[in-house]
Amino acid sequence: MGCRPAAAGGKTHILLFESELRALCVFVAKFPRVSAIGSRLLFFALLLFDAPVLLADDQVAVTVQHPWMRAVPDVMDSTAVYMTLVNNGSAPAELVGGSTSIAGSVAPMITTKQGEGTKQTVGMQSVDSLKIPAHGTLVLEPDGNHLMVMGLKEHPKEGTQVDFTIKLEPGDHEIHLKIPVSRRPVK
Amino acid sequence: MSSVTQKSASVSGPPPKRSFFDWRVWTVASVLLAAVLLSIFFGLKQHAQQGFFGTRLFPLKTAYDFKLNGLNSAQVRLDQFRGKTVLFLFGFTHCANVCPTSLTNLADVYQALTPEERKQVQVIFVSVDPDRDNPQTLAQYVTAFDPSFVGLTAPKPVMDQTVLAYGANYEMVAGPTNEPNDYSVNHSAYTYLVNPSGQLELLYGNEKLAEVPKMVSDIRAVLHEPRS
């Protein structure tokens, strides 16, 4: 990338979505004279109107897209969280877990398949981490990789939002999110 | 023809007489016959599959008449649903990813049918985890996806027999803690479609259930099949 993301000072950078970042770069490149004010205005506008803007340091440059928590029947004591994690950095990152006040624990899980044909079994397995490759994405989706939310203390109601924190490595990084609760994927 | 026989007779003498049981003739003939039969078989199989999104079984066989436990200690048999199209799948309620996804998709499929068609379709969720899922919990669980859904289970020996009859499989996997209730279940995630005549007709891998319009078109085709 020929254009660095806008710096918010110090070690911390605020990264925008890749597409917006590119638009910002194009804007700055086209109008060098207004770039000083223009880019700052555009930057704050995006900051105001875009929800999943997040803090990241030099090591971890990950943005979160379309997060959602599955609304599950009341008899269930667990649920799953899905999202797409985009790594804008040149170093690989890892999703190591998460936390939320409404549940006891959160763990990254993979979906496993064993056997062939109708004998094939589908299961899930807890893993230490899920990799987000450099300049790549990690997709958590129904039937696939997910964050399992175990020991629900209160039941997430469809249509509400839940405070949810994901943990990334390196750097013991946390991203705080407000996640919609839904039965179906939130786009 | 007479000129040919004359010619061959005059040039090379009488042709060598081939026995009726010449092995070469029979080998060629049987290979040809086998090829014809195989092409008919695969042609029929192809024909049987044609148009269906699910994997169609060929030939169709009567589905195993499972006898499982429903609400209020009622025994529920598959044959009770004759005349309806039944979609059933194996799972367990402590499943946070695959089972809710399948049931949400099946609810979408069910709701995409007309009210008249819905009366002829029954979705059944069969729990392979009877220790943690009783019929009451199961009913609360499945009706959260659609009020019409039915949840059934049975003690392990009956469940094993049912799972075996459908060529399915399941396995308990211990969780990270040593608590007896901390386990997950790896299980077959196929949805079986049993037609109104009680024949197992179509199979769907769990990913297929998300294709609502294709699922709906399969169910409609099954509902409109001529019945003998």
Image (spheres, helix red, strand yellow):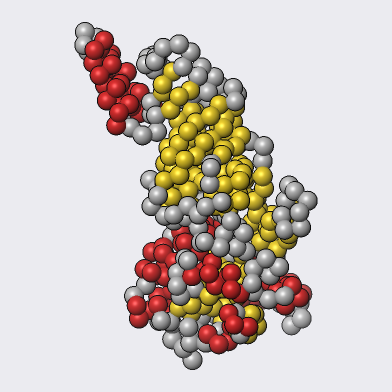
Question: Is residue A63 left or right of B186 when viewed as pictured?
Answer: left
Give A180 or A135, whichever is nearer the viewer.
A180
Which residue: 65% across, 54% down? A123
**Residue B87 or A184: which is nearer the viewer?**
A184
Residue with the most extreme top position: A33
Pick the residue in front: A186 or B218. A186
* Quarter placement of the N terminus of chain B: bottom right
Name the residue at 67% across, 48% down: A125
Residue in the picture at 21% in, 11% down: A34
> In the rendering, at what x and y percent does residue B62 appear?
60, 83
- Of B17 and A105, nearer the camera is A105
Q: Report how many numbered discs are placed on residues in the image.
A: 0
Which image quadrant is residue A77 in?
Answer: bottom right
* Residue B25 sits above or below residue A71 on the image: below
Q: Position of residue A33 (x, y in %)?
A: 21, 8
User: Residue B186, located in which quarter of the rendered image?
Assistant: bottom right
Residue at 39% over, 15% down: A8
Residue B218, image x, y percentages: 44, 71
Task: Kindly tell me whether residue B181 is visible in this rendering.
Answer: yes
The answer to whether residue A93 of the structure is visible from this angle is no
